[in-house]
Amino acid sequence: MADRRADTVRSPLDRVVERSAHALARARAEGGSAGRVRLRQLEVTAVIAVQAGLAAALAALLAQWLLGPGAHVFAPAAAVGTIATAIGQRARRTFELLVGVGLGIVVGDLLRYLLGSGSWQTGLVVTLAIATALLVAGRGGALVGQAGGTAVLIATLAPVQPGLELPRIFDALVGGLVGLFVVALLLPVNPIRVLDRATEPVVARLTAQLDAVAQALTRRDADAAQRALEDLRGLEPDVGRLNEALSGAEEVVTIAPVRWHRRAQYHRYADAVAHLERLILYARSVARRSATALQYDEPVPPALPDAVGRLGDAVRELHRACRVGADFTRTRQLVEEGAALAGRAWGQGVRTFGEAMISDLRTADSELLRATGCVAEEANSAVRRAAGAGEAEVRPPARARMRRRVRADGRGVPGRAGVPRRPPSRTSGAA
């Protein structure tokens, strides 16, 4: 007990030293991560540019070899269109391109045969081709664009240059297949780098704002907590790009044989990232309740900002483990430390919004454990145990405090609810 009191006396200075060390380490890590993100962006940009150039050259050569000499413009254009589309949509883009060309040819030839050629016929052909494509696809995209473009070519050039239909179909087929061949076999991107490039800004902003909330609680700065909340609300575009990157990485590990050895790491990474979006919601709730608690001048136990900061540390460690393929032991350790700090804050005393904040922190800790592969029941149980241990450090259970040694004469035997019974007084016995 004496050691615990001594630790409590030294704990404010210890916490200041620990937070300073964490802040310095985070600043160094964020500076290094920013450089790594820029390098990865340049690498991916260079790969996509080389893919597009190679696909265009191969498509032009193959079209001339298969279809004979001539200006086979659409084959390299289709190949570049396949490469330049969003990673994760290339196979679908090729399929839509071929279907759109087919619809444009069918509608254009049919209406030209029935109505003839002319300005108003061209407008009607394009209208019906795009309407048909929209009905088939249900939305805009490559299918609709190719249907309209092909219908224009058929309506305007077919009367003066017969036989456009077959070369157009072959050009689309050659270009699309060459594009897929390049991205799947010749120069496939690294799916883990694709995920890293999209995950890095989300993790960096999320952890930076969790640190900001922790500092706001320490300084009792409600405005700083509100600014952190606003920044967390601006993560939606980054989360959208992360979801696109997940789709792209999945496409690569599916169609590129040279990347099949990355499948296990991809699925491990993807399972962890799937919980990140829900974690952002809990972080927003923590920031919002922090601002409200400070505005209402509620008490902020010293362990509460430490629990928020430890959540950010756990997110960083989760990302690092996914990137390098390490185990999640350190991540789980940080999560349990954060849950213990939340339990300690509860024991130190909080009010309405502080209690809600601790509940959000515990839910976020459970979500992080699930991101490491724990099932929901296991994660919830681990968080409860850690939080209970943290609370017991500052507020031992009432049953232990009220325990008394039973005397030989029977006095002091615990009664109901652990309260010792008082021996009967002589006056009451005489009555």
Image (cartoon, grey):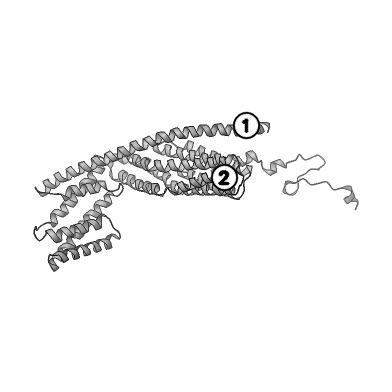
Q: Nearer the viewer, residue 239 or 219?
A: 219
- Closest to the observer: 257 or 53? 53
The answer to whether residue 357 is visible is yes
> Along the line of sight, which residue is nearer the eye, 24 or 427?
24
Q: Which residue is mark 1?
A: 10
| Residue beneath the point at 11% across and 46% down | 64
Residue 384's tag is: 2
**Which quadrant is home to the N terminus?**
top right
Q: Position of residue 98 (x, y in %)?
A: 21, 54
Q: Nearer the viewer, mark 1 or mark 2?
A: 1
Secondary-structure class at tag 2 = helix
In x, y percent, where is residue 288? 52, 49
Q: Are marks 1 and 2 in contact (CB under 8 Å)?
A: no
**At 28% from the left edge and 59% from the top edge, which residue is drawn?**
137
| Cα separation between marks 1 and 2 | 27 Å
Q: Secondary structure at mark 1?
A: helix
Q: Is residue 397 left or right of residue 372?
A: right
Q: Is residue 378 visible?
A: no
Asked whether, in this view, residue 14 is left or right of residue 235, the answer is: right
Q: Residue at x 52, y 39 (%)?
A: 309
Please determine whether, in this image, residue 132 is positioned above or below residue 182. below
Sequence order check: which comes first, mark 1 or mark 2?
A: 1
What is the crowding at mark 2: few (fewer than 14 residues within 10 Å), some, or many (at least 20)? Answer: some
Q: Residues within 10 Å of mark 1 (few under 14, many from 20)?
A: few
Q: Which mark is residue 226?
A: none
What is the residue that sits farthest to the bottom in this orientation?
114
Disc 1 residue type?
Answer: Arg
Question: In the rendering, at what x and y percent does residue 168 appear?
Answer: 15, 54
Image location of residue 223, percent across then percent down: 52, 46
> Which kind of residue does numbered mark 2 sit on?
Arg
Task: Please state if 158 lies on the left or on the right of 92 as rendered.
Answer: left
